[in-house]
Image (spheres, rainbow, N blue to C red):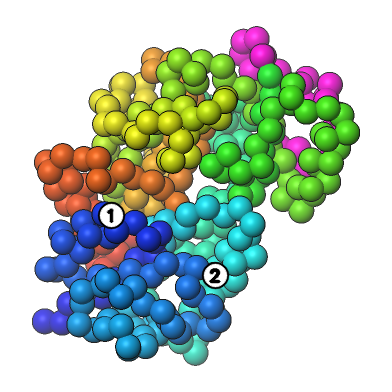
Amino acid sequence: MEKKKICLFSKSNDDERFLFQEILGERYDIAFLDWETLRGGELITRIDPKSERVFLERDEMWRLSDFDVLHVLSMGKFEKKERDVALFFNTLEQMTSKRIKPPFMINPPRVMMKNLNKSYLVELQENSISTIPTVELKVYTPREEIIKRVQEKSKGSLEDVVLKPKIFGERANSVIRLNETDDSNLEGYFLENKSRGVLAQAFIPDVELYHERSLVYVSRKFSHAALRYRGEGWLPPTGTLGRLPEKIKPSKQELKVCEKILDFKGKNYAPITRFDVIGRRDFPMISEVEEINPSIYLSRLPDSDLIKFFELYQKGIEEYFSGKFTA
C-alpha cells in the first residue's frame, strides 16, 4: 500500500525535523517545507534538500495538491514579514478552489488567522477562563482610560499595563509598557498599529518569580511541559534569550485551565497546541494559546516522552484520515 504523504511547513530546525522523519518516516512519507520558500500558486519550487524521501528528491517539483495532508507546524518570527504571511495564507486558501483537489489541511487559513489575532484572549476571559486581564482597543485611547479599563478587569492592584498589537503581537513583537511610554509615543504607537488594533493587558510582575511555563497538548492529550526563563529586562524569553527551557511537571491548576480551553473549543483544536501560562502555579493565567507556531522543545525530551508525543501525534493524523476531525 502506498504511504500517505504529509508535508510539514516548519522552521529550519534540523533536530525537530530529524525526529519527525526518524519516528514517523516508516509509516508516512514526510516532507519539510520552510513557509518562506513558498511563492505564488501552489507549486513547491524549493524543497528541503535534507529530506530523505525518494519522492522528494532535490531536483523534482511537486504540487501541494500531491500531498494527503498539509500541516503548518511552525513559521518562525513574523515581524516585518506580515505581507509574506498574508501571501502564504492566500496560497493555501487557493487550495480550496474547485479546480484543484486539495489535500486535507491541518490548521486551514481561517484557523491560523484567528490564532494570529490575539483577541481570542478577550473571548476566553469573557467565558470565565483564567487569562491575563485583557482589553481590546480599536482606536487611540488616552492613558488614563487604558488604565481604568484594564483595572476593571483586574482583581488586584495594577502595577502597569502592557500594550501589544492585536494581530502578530507575539514573541515580544512591538510590545511596550505604558509606564515606559510618554504620551507622544503612545499616540504614535496607536497610529503605527491602526490596521492591526491594540490589546492592553495587566503587567504581571511575578513573571520574574515564576517565569513563563509552556504546556504542550497533542490530540487533546497532555504531552509535556517546559519552564521558560526570562530574558533580559521584563519581557519573557523568545527562545534565544535566557536559559534553555527545562522539562517540568505541571500543577493540577495549570492542567485544568488548559483543558478548560480545549473543552471550550470543542472539536476545533489543533493536533499540537501549546498553552503559555504565567502567574503563581496554583493560580495560572493564560498568556497565549499557540496553535500554528508553537516551539515544542522536542530536543529537550527524554526518549519516553518523545515516544508518547509521537504516539499522540500519529493518533491525531489518523483521525484526520478517518474523517473524525472537523477543523
Residue 28 in picture, x, y percent from top left: 19, 70
Query: Is 312 situated above or below 135?
Result: below
Q: Residue furthest top?
A: 157
Residue 264 in picture, x, y percent from top left: 45, 40
Asked if residue 138 lies in the magenta stretch, the reply is yes
Instruction: Please tell me how crowded label 1 is: few (under 14), some (14-19), or many (20+) other residues with Cα within 10 Å.
Output: some
Instruction: Please tell me how crowded label 2 is: few (under 14), some (14-19), or many (20+) other residues with Cα within 10 Å.
Output: many
Identified at 25% across, 25% down, the residue is 249
User: Could you tell me if residue 299 is visible in this image?
Assistant: yes
- The quarter of the picture where residue 317 lies is bottom left
Identified at 66% across, 14% down, the residue is 159
Name the residue type under label 2: Phe
Query: Is 249 situated above or below 209?
Result: below
Residue 24 in picture, x, y percent from top left: 17, 62
Name the residue type under label 1: Glu
Question: Of residues 212 and 184, which is closer to you in this image?
Answer: 184
Label 1 sits on residue: 16
Identified at 38% across, 70% down, the residue is 33
- The quarter of the picture where residue 172 lies is top right
Identified at 50% across, 21% down, the residue is 207
Q: Nearer the viewer, mark 2 or mark 1?
A: 1
Question: Of residues 187 and 155, which is closer to you in this image?
Answer: 187
Going from N to C along the chain, the mark reached first, 2 or 1, is 1
- SS for callout 2: helix
Asked if residue 178 lies in the magenta stretch, the reply is no
Q: Which residues are magenta?
A: 135-159
Which disc is residue 88 wearing?
A: 2
- SS for callout 1: helix
Query: Is 100 situated above or below 27?
Result: below
Residue 35 in picture, x, y percent from top left: 46, 67
Count every numbered label the image shows and give the total. Answer: 2
